[in-house]
Amino acid sequence: MGAQILRIGVPKGSLQEATLALFKRAGYTFRVDGRSYFPQVDDDEIEATLLRAQEIPRYVAEGVLDAGLTGYDNVVESDVDVVEVAEMVFSKTTSRPYRWVLAVPDDADIHSVRDLQGKRIATELVNVTRRYLERHGVEATVEFSWGATEVKVPYLVDAIVEGTETGSTLRAHRLRIIDELLVSTPRWIANRQAYADPWKRQKMENICLLLQGALDAEGMVGLKMNVPRGRLERVLDNLPAMRRPTISSLADEDWVALETILPEKRARDLIPELKRAGAEGIVEYPLNKVVP
């Protein structure tokens, strides 16, 4: 019997760098050679394929792939039957979720979706937009946009449905958001048959646990220090922690070792306070993963 293999889809394009960096922190190193769509990974039980995120839900649903990372927007747009195993909140630029919004020119006499009756809308999210209009009883023409959607209003279309994290690009094009259609974050999705397979399911859950641990470690650092027992309460009063910090006895009974995890930005101000409170030998170290 051959070795068990989990076939996964990895998003190519804007999310590729962030995704591969996340896998790296989780313990999986991918090597992408030139134009190859099949990166090598240092786990013989994983076969990876680089694909546009929009394509991954369909290939997972059809069983070509066992699982993959893609945006929730792509799952909804594809309207396919897959298992959503986990949400992975990360992006190419910020930790904010990706929002699909309805936008119109600042000076347009359009203030709600009902004002779009008989109008023309451009978007990459055609199916979601059509269903949105149907829910509101609005008939409008929805056309697929191949890119540069913001520049199409008002000359080619009356409104757009576009994805944004910060809204800065929309503002730069003097566009006004009048509604939000969908909030999207990356999801680990699985083929239903593959997820029913005990080995594949456990492999997926192991990967998701490590990926989530890497995400939870972002912006966090570890601190360890030695503290005189007589000053322990004073040090603890200054010390935030996920839970209570770890306290260990030392060979010298008058001292203890203390270790905790905290936001990296907090460490800058906290370390001098800890030093003044009596801590010594303070060491700050980076974290790859935090698994509760």
Image: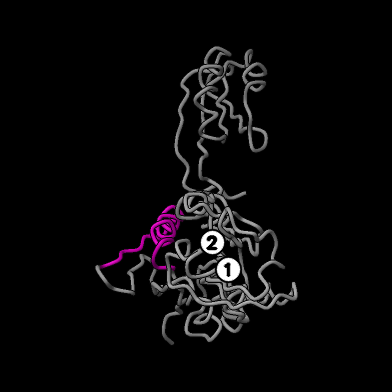
Query: Residue 219, percent across and down?
Result: 51, 40
Colour scheme of the rendered structure:
one colour
SS for dot 1: helix
The disc at residue 163 is 2
Q: Residue at x 49, y 18 (%)?
A: 280
The Cα atoms of the two marked residues, 2 and 1, are separated by 9 Å
The disc at residue 117 is none
Is the residue marked by circle 2 packed among few (<14), some (14-19), or many (20+) residues within 10 Å? many
Query: Residue 73, percent across and down?
Result: 58, 68
Q: Nearer the viewer, residue 219 or 44?
A: 219
Q: Residue type at mark 1: give it.
A: Asp
Q: Quadrant of residue 233?
A: top right
The count of marks equals: 2
Q: Residue at x 55, y 18 (%)?
A: 274
The answer to whether residue 271 is left or right of residue 51 is right
Q: Is residue 48 magenta?
A: no
Image quadrant occupied by the N terminus: bottom left
Which span is picked out in magenta? Answer: 11-33
Q: Quadrant of residue 241?
A: top right
Q: Nearer the viewer, residue 231 or 186?
A: 186
Q: Nearer the viewer, mark 2 or mark 1?
A: 2
Which residue lies under the disc numbered 1? 73
Q: Residue type at mark 2: give it.
A: Gly
